[in-house]
Amino acid sequence: MASKSKENGTARRSFNEAIAGGAAGAFARTVVAPIDRIKLCSQLRGSIHTSSSTTFSPHDTALQIFQKLVHSEGLLSLWRGNFPTICAEAGNTALNFVFFERYKQVSDHILDSIGSSHFREDDHNVGRNRRILRSFISGGLAGATTVTFMYPLGFMRTRLACDVGADKTNERQFKNMRHITKSIWASDGFRGFYQGYGIALISVSMHRFIYLGGYDFIKSEYAARQTIQDSSGRNKMLLAERYVAAQIVSMSASTLHYPLDCVRRRLMMQAGVPKEARKYRNAFQCFVRVWNEEGVRGFYLGLGPNLLRCVGSALALVFYDEFKRILTSL
């Protein structure tokens, strides 16, 4: 009976984490969808079809890209590809938080079984080692697991967002998600939806290592310090404090993993293109070619809009905490 009650409690907790994560991710991503499309067009300007009616020069700023998109396609085009984005982001965020919480539990069991004095929870200084390992490793593993499941949706979002239409006729390469699925399946099969997956695995794991792990560590470290120093018993960060922490880890994670993300998305853009016509053979060759032809700047195209987009990533972390608190109290 106790075992069944425990299972029900675990299932309810996982359900709350999934709903809270999905809602937070969908809401935050919709808010920053225009910034995301500008970032993608800036980052992938060299990979967008040359026959496109909307062309971007290597020197176009984010503002100029915004103006070109609105002028040629209208204001609502800034949300083009937002439905698969919401599907991908809701699923991504939900899975990220569910896996993150589960990996934290597993990490606790492993650290308990090790029984080393370096990982005791009751000593603040020693407990920091435990919190660092638990938070950061769980974040990286959650990212790796999630990207494996959700990569095809992210792939389709990227292709739709960067599809700006053919010259004169303004006819786009892909009409919708169904069309892009059929086209890529016909040309590349199942593997086509995982173009750039290897570099994505490294890139996303690095991002979540800092993004999820860093945010969780800051909260747990704050709670541990306040428990010792604050006699009032307040050991949770205020909403504003959590948002500042979320913004810091979000911007740090995005900046550090951005070159890998650039390579990943360029490889994504080649799906459906005949192998002999592809610009990049693999991730390493793509990295070398971008370095030789564009220099360091080539790896950071669109970084400005991406840092603005971190507002949404930070909101997702904070909203998750709030949604989870509300669902837990019901």
Image (cartoon, grey):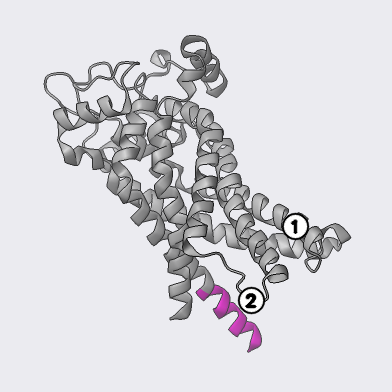
Of badges 1 and 2, the one in the foreground is 2
- Quarter location, residue 129: bottom right
- The dot on residue 56 is none
Q: Quadrant of the C terminus?
A: bottom left
- The dot on residue 233 is 2
Looking at the image, which residue is at 40% across and 37% down?
155
The stretch of residues the image draws in magenta is: 1-12
Looking at the picture, does residue 205 appear above or below residue 114?
A: above
Residue furthest right in the image: 117
Q: Position of residue 117 (x, y in %)?
A: 88, 61
- Does residue 165 appear to the left or right of 59 in the view shown? left
- The residue beneath circle 1 is 128
Identity, as a three-letter code, of the amino acid under mark 2: Gly
Q: Quadrant of the N terminus?
A: bottom right
Q: Position of residue 186 (x, y in %)?
A: 33, 32
Looking at the image, which residue is at 71% across and 58% down?
131
- Does residue 270 appear to the left or right of 136 in the view shown? left
Q: Position of residue 216 (x, y in %)?
A: 60, 57
Looking at the picture, does residue 150 appear above or below residue 198?
A: below
Magenta stretch: helix, strand or loop mostly: helix
Residue 60 visible: yes
Give the Cα distance between marks 1 and 2.
Answer: 20 Å
Label 1: how many residues lie within 10 Å, few (<14), some (14-19) or many (20+)? some
Magenta run includes residue 268: no
**CB under 8 Å between callouts 1 and 2?**
no
Dot 2 falls on a residue whose secondary structure is: loop
Residue furthest bottom in the image: 1
Looking at the image, which residue is at 45% across and 26% down?
267
Identity, as a three-letter code, of the amino acid under mark 1: Arg
Dot 1 falls on a residue whose secondary structure is: helix
